[in-house]
Amino acid sequence: MRVQTLTLAVAGAALLAPTALPAAVHPNEPVRYEGGVRASDLLAKVRDCAPVSNGHYRSDAGAPADIPVCGTDDVVFWKADMDIDCDGQAGPRCNGRTDPYFADSTAYQQSDGRYLDPERLPFIVVPMASGIWNYRDHGIRGGSVAAVIYKDRVQYAVVGDTGPQDIIGEASYAAAAALGINPDPHGGGAASGVTYIVFKNARVSPIENHTAAVEAGEQLARRFVGQEAESTESTENTDSAESDATVAGDSTDSSDSTDSTG
């Protein structure tokens, strides 16, 4: 099924063009505030839950199953803890010595074929498709744009890995560090208070282009909370520039992988 295409006026960001960043170049390091949309504004929009999952997830193995995936016309979201995903490219902070559960792969790969770099790229983990919930049915793919909120901080990220079918609430080392959460894969994370918002039918490519994720995430967030940019000229004349400012989802896209626990 081909999902709806969403056109965004993101100045200078070729979000689907593989030339947006050289494949081997890491995007900018995450910073505390990546845009003008406040955490409080986003949280106000996800105060109430209309469940889209058929059941509930656990925050950790053995914990109660009490976390639903909620949805609106534009997003899916959940409120959980944050476990640290250090899987992917090994580095000084994420490797078999620092993380007893380290795996050298992620569900999705960079444009150069390498697995994602958890120390540099903010990404979140979605549960593998199951009878509880299938993320693909809601326009979510590898590279889907997300906003992660903790206290007063908003961090834009992408969907970069999949996890166990019954557990939710996990993000990369880089995402945790940018939110002020202890990113140590062995004992770090946050016990609660993390909100994950994933925008439907909106993804960036190459997946490692964090700059594009921030630009797209900021505009999507503004639209979601009703803070459309004051200037609408670019959005009224998108036909000629659609290939340079499009975030799209496609169930047949080659960037979408089979599920793995990562």
Image (cartoon, helix red, strand yellow):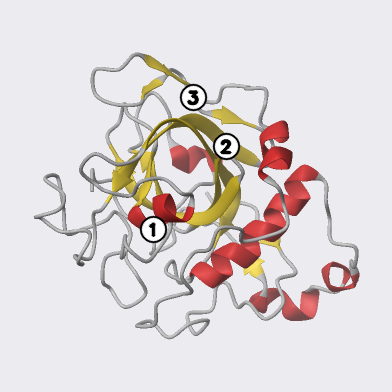
Of marks 3 and 1, the one in the foreground: 1
N-term mark: 2 or 3: 3
Q: Is residue 5 visible?
A: no
Of marks 1 and 2, the one in the foreground: 1
Could you tell me residue 198's position as x and y percent?
A: 55, 45
Q: Residues within 10 Å of mark 3 (few under 14, many from 20)?
A: some
Q: CA distance from mark 3 to mark 1?
A: 28 Å
At 65% from the left and 77% from the top, the residue drawn is 243
Three-letter code for the amino acid on which mark 2 is drawn: Val
State the residue position of label 1: 174
Give left or right: position of 15 versus 232. Answer: left
Secondary structure of the residue carrying tag 2 is strand
N-term mark: 1 or 2: 2
- From the viewer's side, name the closer residue of 93 and 147: 93
Three-letter code for the amino acid on which mark 1 is drawn: Ala
At 65% from the left and 53% from the top, the residue drawn is 4
Q: Quadrant of residue 52?
A: top right
Q: CA distance from mark 1 to mark 2?
A: 22 Å
Three-letter code for the amino acid on which mark 3 is drawn: Ser
Seen in the picture, residue 58 relative to 82 is either above or below; the reply is above
Give left or right: position of 71 versus 163. Answer: right
At 62% from the left and 22% from the top, the residue drawn is 49
Could you tell me residue 173's position as x and y percent?
A: 34, 54
Secondary structure of the residue carrying tag 3 is loop
Seen in the picture, residue 205 relative to 192 is either above or below; the reply is below
Q: Residues within 10 Å of mark 1 (few under 14, many from 20)?
A: many
- From the viewer's side, name the closer residue of 149 and 125: 149
State the residue position of label 2: 76
Secondary structure of the residue carrying tag 1 is helix
In contact (CB < 8 Å): disc 2 and disc 3: no
State the residue position of label 3: 53
